[in-house]
Image (spheres, rainbow, N blue to C red):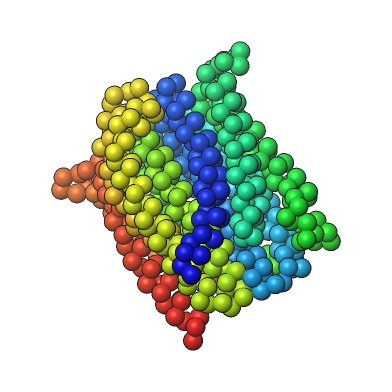
Amino acid sequence: MLAHHSRLILAHATPMLLAQLSSMGMMIIDTALLGHYGTDDLAAVAVGGGIYISVVFALAGILQAIAPTVAHLHGAGREREIAGVLQQALWLALLLAIPGVLILRHPEPLLALSRIDPLVESKARAYLALLALGLPAILLYRTFHAFCNALGQPRPLLLISLGNTLLHGLLASLLVTGAWGGEALGVLGCGLSNVAVSGFSLLCALAYLRFGKALRPYRLFTGWQRPRRKPLGQLLRLGLPMGFSHFVEISSFTLMALFVAQLGATVVAGHRIVANLAAICYMLPLALGIATLAQVGQAAGARDWQRAERSIGAGLLLAGGLSALLGLFLWRIAGPVTAAYTDDPAVQAVALGLIGYVALYQLFDAVQTIAAHALRGYRITFVPMFVHVVCFWGVGLLGGWWLAFHARQPMGVAGFWLASGVSLVLASVLLGALLWRAMQAVKQ
């Protein structure tokens, strides 16, 4: 039976992983193009991109509330209620875009957290102003993304993601380098390309919602609802802790980039490369976590607790084993990978000094990711949020800040990565224990 549930999770997670890696390809394109264009522009996308990702993940995390909600309805056979949930989630996405755009247009409080080179800060602010234009489309698309995953429909996400990456690769390479026939725009070229891609992904999502054969039985655009307080409140109660957990997890790396910025553009650029690699590695347990959430949510909706347990076991075994192998592989190819990102020997040296931390913590990152997503499948989101705050902000960020700047022998940027690894070990233990208690409680 465990093999059966493993196949179900892999069938969902594989196209999801490919879709996410394709999306990460946009980040790789930005980093590689700017790494060869200029260190200041690469540092600007490291700082600005970190802020942008924190905002998007926090707001998209709230919208992830649609995933367990729809999975429960689907598992319980309440198909007629699914269209209304999606419609309210789309309204919520538009409402959440308002504060998101304001933050991106006015990032001064975040940029003030660290001393940043004025040129890098100027470029980062201009980059964020461009990305704000595409934020509403991104949030609407992320709602569609969570909806498809809840129903076990990842293939359209893969196709859209591949299209996004191809389009971004073409546009960014033309705009960054000046190959389009005009001025080389550097980091601004990456921003303009991201805005165009966000619009493209939304158009594709709307087309699939309207014409996709697999979604026709749900009649998603029939009887369109206005925003309603009660269903919006239900989504927020479930989604706000999820969004805050996403924000804590991502912002711990964002704030790390801001603190590291005072160590100079070279260190920031090296940190950016390693953060990029860490994000790519995270796509594996994340894809398996999303698939596990869908399976657990559908099983919980049907009140089939044995199926939920087997799905969790399969998710943990797959994510733990594969992530450990991935960490070993990353360690072995560290040199060629860093050389592909940048020609600057100093930046390469910084990156090579940090990659070992990422390789070592892969197993623990996988365990905490699966545990957190399985808990969301049970619609348990509040306590995991506190675990993330304690681990990622308390141990990871504050501990890293102390190790980097205030320990008896300050470790610099390596202190942040060491503390991040410790925070993931602690999170895997705490969330694993919480998941075990949840699995026992639902059977009583």
Residue 285, picture quadrant: bottom left
Q: Is residue 306 left or right of residue 343?
A: right
Q: Residue furthest left?
A: 408
The residue lying at 36 percent from left, 56 percent from top is 321
The single residue placed furthest to the right in the displayed view is 223
Q: Nearer the viewer, residue 327 or 274?
A: 327
- 76 shown above or below 393: below
Determine whether 434 is above or below 101 in the image.
below
- Establish if 102 lies above or below 83: above
Give the image location of residue 356, x and y in percent.
27, 43
Tell me, yes or no, if residue 181 can be seen here: yes
Across and down, in percent, residue 364 comes to 34, 57
Residue at the image position 61 percent from the left and 16 percent from the top: 180
Q: Position of residue 205 (x, y in %)?
A: 70, 46
Q: Residue at x 51, y 65 (%)?
A: 4
Image spot of residue 217 (x, y percent): 78, 61
In the picture, measured across the screen, residue 380 lies left or right of residue 68, that is left
Image quarter of residue 298: bottom right
Residue sitting at x 57%, y 15%: 179
Horizontal relation, residue 173 to residue 313: left or right:
right
Count of numbered badges drawn on the protein: 0
The answer to whether any part of residue 379 appears in the image is: no
87 or 72, which lies in front?
Answer: 72
- Which residue is farthest top? 181
